[in-house]
Image (cartoon, grey):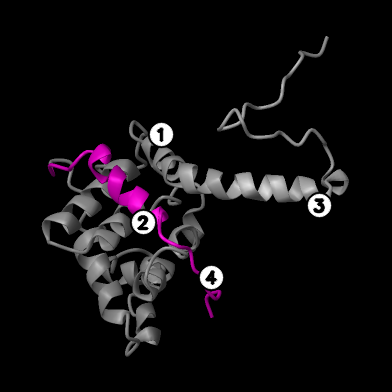
């Protein structure tokens, strides 16, 4: 016998559930209600759920690095913080590899699209391309083109991407590094996602 299932609870009990299965059955009034609630939901939940995506990886194994992606992310953010970087940069360091395991070949684009509506052009550009900029630090990796980043030489954000990868990415794999805890960065992430989002063009 199929188990009875009640609809998912709402974030706020005074909200209205649209009790229709097909989107085709949603009325204009239904969409108005849903979108009004959606705006508040995103505002209150987005940062928390992004942080949860990182938090669940705390005890993940590694496939060979001395630290897992969780520790790498904390170390990157802590190093940026201790170097006096702006809060946005610290958050970008924390979340730059959030898609590293889920979508390894496009994890830079993943982070860029996740954060792109809330960060500067400089960080959006860097996030998209930081995997390519990493190549210069992996000269013995079979098949790697260490000079692939040179296609962007002269771009206004080239130097930041090179600096980020050199100081806060490829160097953030030390198992003995004293990282700040994730809870320390939570207010920073919340402030970033509280910004008014902007639309971004796709990577050319």
Nearer the observer, disc 1 or disc 4? Answer: 4
Horizontal and vertical percent position of residue 109: 48, 64
Earlier along the polypeptide chain: callout 3 or callout 2? Answer: 3
Residue at point 25% right, 67% down? 164
Residue at point 32% right, 42% down? 70
Q: Is residue 165 above or below residue 3?
A: below
CB under 8 Å between discs 1 and 2: no
Q: Is residue 185 above or below residue 90?
A: above
Q: Read off the residue under disc 2.
A: 192
Horizontal and vertical percent position of residue 43: 48, 48
Horizontal and vertical percent position of residue 99: 45, 51
CB under 8 Å between discs 2 and 4: no
Residue at point 28% right, 69% down? 139
Nearer the observer, disc 1 or disc 2? Answer: 2
Location of residue 121 (image quadrant): bottom left
Q: Read off the residue under disc 1.
A: 56
User: Cα distance, mark 2 to mark 4?
Assistant: 15 Å
User: Cα distance, mark 1 to mark 4?
Assistant: 29 Å
Dot label at residue 198 = none
Nearer the observer, disc 3 or disc 2? Answer: 3
Q: Nearer the viewer, residue 41 or 111?
A: 41
Q: Read off the residue under disc 4.
A: 199
Dot label at residue 28 = 3
Crowding at mark 4 (Cα within 10 Å: few <14, some 14-19, many 20+): few
Secondary structure category for the residue under label 1: loop
Nearer the observer, disc 1 or disc 3? Answer: 3
Earlier along the polypeptide chain: callout 1 or callout 2? Answer: 1
């Amino acid at each position: 016998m199929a188990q009875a299932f009640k609809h998912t609870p709402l974030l706020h009990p005074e909200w209205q559930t649209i009790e229709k299965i097909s989107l085709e059955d949603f009325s204009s009034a239904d969409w108005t209600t849903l979108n009004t609630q959606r705006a508040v939901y995103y505002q209150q939940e987005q940062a928390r759920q992004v942080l949860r995506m990182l938090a669940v990886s705390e005890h993940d194994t590694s496939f060979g690095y001395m630290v897992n992606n969780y520790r790498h992310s904390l170390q990157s953010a802590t190093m940026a913080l201790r170097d006096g970087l702006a809060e946005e940069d610290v958050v970008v360091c924390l979340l730059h590899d959030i898609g590293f395991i889920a979508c390894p070949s496009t994890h830079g684009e993943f982070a860029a699209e996740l954060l792109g509506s809330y960060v500067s052009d400089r960080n959006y550009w860097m996030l998209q391309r930081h995997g390519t900029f990493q190549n210069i630090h992996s000269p013995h990796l079979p098949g790697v083109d260490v000079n692939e980043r040179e296609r962007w030489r002269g771009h206004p954000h080239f130097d930041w991407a090179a600096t980020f990868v050199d100081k806060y990415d490829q160097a953030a794999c030390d198992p003995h590094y004293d990282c700040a805890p994730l809870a320390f960065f939570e207010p920073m992430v919340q402030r970033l996602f509280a910004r008014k989002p902007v639309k971004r063009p796709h990577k050319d």
